[in-house]
Image: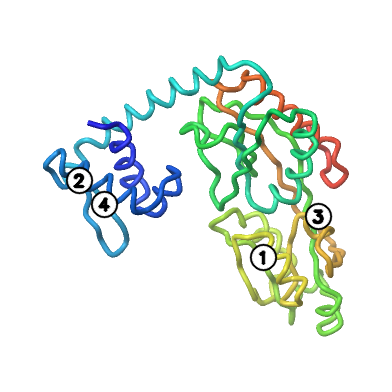
Amino acid sequence: MDWDDLRVFLAVAKSGSLTRAARDLGLSQPTVGRRIAALEKRTGARLLDRTPTGYITTAAGAAILAGLERMEGEALAVERMIIGHDAGLSGPVRVTAIEWFAARVLAPIFADFTLEHPEVTIELLTDVRLFSLTRREADIALSFNRFDQADIFQRKVADVPHALFASPDYIARRGTPDCRTGMGGHAIIQMDEQHGGQVDAEWLAGIAVDAHVALRSNSREAQARACAAGAGVAVLPRCLGEKTPGLVEIVTHSLPPTRTVWLGVHRDVRQTPRVRALVEATAEGLKTSGYLADAA
């Protein structure tokens, strides 16, 4: 059987979606559908069933899933080993980070790197989720959470302080929020707790217990723009809030949260020259950036 077809089946079985599998594999959705159909025809067995919530494996599909995952793991290990012995500062390096951090913080650092190393191509991948280092979807990941995989080397590269922001128009309409009295009569914009907003929510619970939550989003950029448009008061990273036109900082009686940034890289590719060079340039760029405090 064609490994490419098996890999397509594995991607659909894991994601439950032709669209997500196509995106992860760099294929079109019709191509994914055709390869699944060809695989089922070749094996003479139906491997996936379509349901209202997505694709699920049949009994036959479930029976081969564990074996395919082992095959994929071995193939990825071989690929990482080959890349790990690659030499020279040339070729692609894939970096994954959340959208606002990639755009506001990493892009300028990477611009300087590409000027110094013109034969390296940086692929900066952004999404709500981080792309997988273990599955070779990315070479370097920057996350606000520690990595829990044993094969990922990680280091702390920055502390990102946050603050409370509002637009002058909002303050003119509703007055300056008083965090010591629970911020009654005010509207709050905050991060969706399913996407890392627990820290924001815990801090706001102590200063804005009487405020109304006007908007939740998994996008910091969306929060910043809604805040600038006067929808409410928002907890934002300083390096985002201070760079967003139309926002001013609100002084609070309690210290706003600070989030730690972790840089992760798979141990098998850690010593690849272009990967190692970009890791060091990123760490140094974050350390020397004026809007990031106490980087280590």
Which residue is drawn at the image coordinates 66% and 18% (left, top)? 88
Task: State the mark number for residue 47.
Answer: 2
The amino acid type of the residue labelled 4 equals Ile
Query: What colour-coding does the image apply?
Result: rainbow
Task: State the mark number for residue 238.
Answer: 3
Could you tell which of marks 2 and 4 lies nearer the N-terminus? 2
Which residue is drawn at the image coordinates 60% and 65% (left, top)? 217
Closer-to-camera residue (169/212): 169
Could you tell which of marks 3 and 4 lies nearer the N-terminus? 4
Could you tell which of marks 3 and 2 lies nearer the N-terminus? 2
Q: Nearer the viewer, mark 3 or mark 2?
A: 2
- Label 3 – label 1 distance at C-alpha: 15 Å
Q: Which residue is mark 1?
A: 222
Marks 1,4: beta carbons within 8 A: no
The image quadrant that residue 219 belongs to is: bottom right
- Label 1 – label 2 distance at C-alpha: 40 Å
Q: Which residue is mark 4?
A: 56
